[in-house]
Image: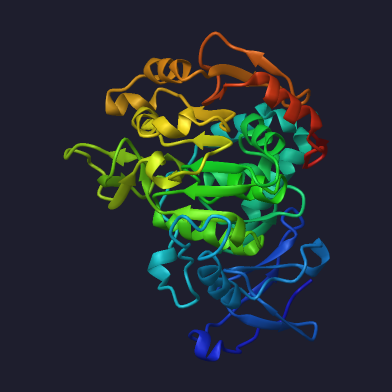
Amino acid sequence: MQHPSTSASWGSNGPPRTTRLAAHPACCRCVFVRRCRPYRAHGKRQAVVFGSVAHGRAGLGPAPDLHSALVRDSESHAGGSLAAAAPNEIPSMNTPPATLRRPAVGVIPLWRTLAFLASHPLNRGHIVRAFSRYLRWQLAIRLLPGAAVVPFVGSSKLLVRRGMTGATGNIYAGLHEPQDMAFAALCLRPGDVFVDVGANVGAYTVLVTTFARAVAIAIEPNPQAMATLKMNLCLNRIVDQVECHTCAVGAGEEIARMTTDLDTMNHLVTNDTHGNEHLAQIPLRSLDQILGNRSATLIKLDVEGYELPALEGATRTLGAAPLLAVVLELNGSGARYRRTDQEVHELMCARGFRPFAFGLFDRRLSPLQDWRHDVGNTLYVRDPAAVLERLASAPPLPVLHHWL
């Protein structure tokens, strides 16, 4: 279905922009647009959502009035459930395009993407559908450049554009990191605090706040990724459930440098000989400083090798009784900081946590002798009995053609 183009303007809310609308392939069930602005389609005035608008047939509902939502968000956090921290700073409609630009990313080899599709547990038995989703997305991003709103889990949605390797994994397979994302959604309950360190564009945050109705503290040092994350909060109407911090996490408070053009692989730089010119200065804070006197229920820590300093700055946070589990990325990338995965593992064991493997289809926890060497993330649990009780009583998680 084709939507007519329009040339109406925002008026005082922002500069007029020419908008192009076109039908999106069925895999994403939405339409692309090139700019943010209201438009009139089928006789009804709706609002374009940061580069995309939900298609009426997709069941996504009308897009929210984002200009009003941004104002409400910046006002609401003063007295919200997470009022102890600074208010969110969501980009306005007048944000310069350079602020929201897509960072340059490397091209993932085709063989690696195909291997991901073929080996993903949620694609087993449905490999033709998986390759169909991949091909349709690849066709869509070439025919209609720009960002797209795509269905996620349940009624949630994600804003995705070309080059977002982590976010596009959710298109291809439902959950990019299936065991860890499903565990987070099934373990948390309404009101629980989820700390998403290295949140990127917010897939974990959107999942746990929409499905489990938890509250989240999203920490992402890359300003461009954080801007997209905040758009996803508005898109899913979960602004009041999430507290955002644009900073990195370490052992203390300082100013650090970080790469900005490696998408999900952006990392801190600790020496002056780094050859990457795409570096930005960012604030570095400890988890104990960010949380203050609050306690987390679940922490996901993905900081590209900087896990040990981040945990060293979370002494009080790790010792708090409500903390049930921590999902850690351990893949050898700490070597760039002269840290080893063994050091991280020993620190977690000293704090009373033990490594487990989560069963995606049976919700079981299997104890491990060591961290996981076959995948990037390892689940550390302190109270397996309490976690198993939560997993058993959680409602089914709908992901593509599965009920987990």
Extreme-top residue of the structure: 369
Q: Residue at x 54, y 91 (%)?
A: 11
Of residues 211 and 142, the one nearer the viewer is 211
Residue drawn at the location 60% of the way across and 18% of the way down = 356
Q: Quadrant of the N terminus?
A: bottom right
The image shows residue 69 at horizontal and vertical percentages of 60, 72
- Residue 360 in view (yes/no): yes
Count of numbered badges drawn on the protein = 0
Seen in the image, is 165 located left or right of residue 58? left
User: Would you identify the image quadrant in which residue 240 lies?
Assistant: bottom right
Q: Is 216 on the left-hand or right-hand side of 265? A: right
Q: Nearer the viewer, residue 3 or 384?
A: 384
Residue drawn at point x = 54 percent, y = 55 percent = 82
Left or right: 36 as drawn, with respect to 265:
right
Residue 382's x, y, as percent?
57, 21
* Colour approach in the figure: rainbow
Q: Can residue 124 be seen at all in this image of the molecule? A: no
Q: Is residue 67 above or below residue 279?
A: below
Q: Which residue sits at x=82%, y=36%?
A: 403
- Residue 76: image location, x then y, percent: 56, 68
Rendering quarter of residue 2: bottom right
36 with respect to 264 (left or right): right
Quadrant of the rendered image containing residue 179? top right
Q: Position of residue 196 (x, y in %)?
A: 52, 42
- Report the quarter where the C terminus lies: top right
Up the image or down, 173 lies above or below 140; here it is: above
